[in-house]
Amino acid sequence: MPRALITGVTGQDGLYLAELLIAKGYEVFGLVRGQNNPRVPRVKQIVPSVRLLDGDLRDLPSLIGALDAAQPDEVYNLGAVSFVGMSWQQAELTSEITGIGVLRMLEAIQIHTHNEMGRVRFYQASSSEMFGKVREVPQTEATPFHPRSPYGVAKVFGHFMTVNYRESYGAHACSGILFNHESPRRGHEFVTRKVTRGVARIALGLQDRITLGNLEARRDWGFAGDYVEAMWLMLQQAEPDDYVIATGVTHSVRDLLDVAFHRVGIGDWDRHVAQDPRLFRPAEVDLLVGDASKARSLLGWKPRSEFRSLVETMVDHDLAVARRERHGSAGRSPDDVVRQTGGPG
């Protein structure tokens, strides 16, 4: 039975990846910072067979201990402070976990394997936010990086550190440059879930409006469940490499609002949406759209879900959650837990 260790297992991507690996017959271990972590019950409810280990991407000895306990064949490093907007307020923490945390995990693998790093296959969750102020459209694995947030800068550090350990120490280390990927498990602070949750609550009379920042920003949005399959496929290849994972189709925040409000029968949503200049990024990333040709040809991967169906699924989920809230239901869906750390976004 193959064994895998996932950092960021409590997040959107970690949960989908754990489900995928378990279905493929893996024994899965998840790294959590303290067994009293408030997101642990979510993991136990959705993927109860995952074995949780204490560890912290800010603490090298704890990572070595987790590796020694799990004895993994594969490590998926999804752990990060992944809400881009928060990275300006917590730039140092973001750098410590999202950036230097990658170096610590690579160092831990080197120590755990006694300098035979190729024994453990490593996946690093890189991000389209590394492209930032894009030099070309669409973006490929060869597009230069110009990050426009502390989060993007930290991801660039982790990405190139992964490349360095691959080239210097023979690590079987891959980076997935994933473009935005969403699901009903996305945290409420992310714009997609903020919109779908807000639309559901507006439709049921629980709130009046959604307050957003830049409505013109365009992103390449896919389904997280599709994207974790690409992570696994990367580590099954004979040679490690880096891959862009994207749909190749871009949509604006306005498009997101159109689809979400249409799902609940509201055509003119202007009166329900307000813009707040405080929610604009200090340095905006206007257009991200990826070219996943390499992943299609070498991994045989392609996205299965399209934008409209993804948004409609998220709205439907949030309608169900909002109805329980309106009727005073005590329980919460395991997928309705705000994610603050976890996979890339």
Image: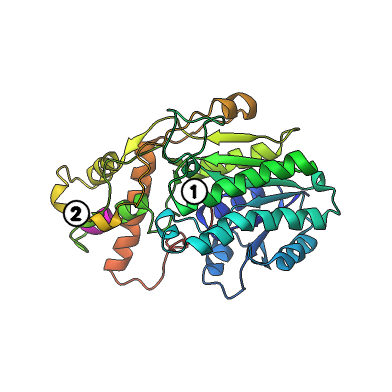
Q: Which residues are magenta?
A: 198-202
Left or right side of 274 for 143: right
**Which label sits in the foreground, 2 or 1?**
1
Left or right side of 130 for 86: left
Where is 77 relative to 339, above or below? Answer: above
Q: Which residue is mark 2?
A: 274
Q: Which residue is mark 1?
A: 152
CA neighbours of label 1 inside 10 A, class few (<14), some (14 to 19), many (20+): many
Residue 123 position, x and y percent, is: 66, 46
Three-letter residue code for mark 1: Gly
Q: Nearer the viewer, residue 58 or 234?
A: 58
CA neighbours of label 2 inside 10 A, class few (<14), some (14 to 19), many (20+): few
Q: Residue furthest bottom?
A: 36
The image quarter in which residue 65 lies: bottom right
- Residue at 58% x, 61% y: name it: 96
Look at the magenta stretch and give its main secondary structure.
Answer: helix
Q: Nearer the viewer, residue 55 or 269?
A: 55
- Residue at 52% x, 65% y: name it: 42
Verify whether residue 32 appears in magenta. no
Name the colour scheme. Answer: rainbow
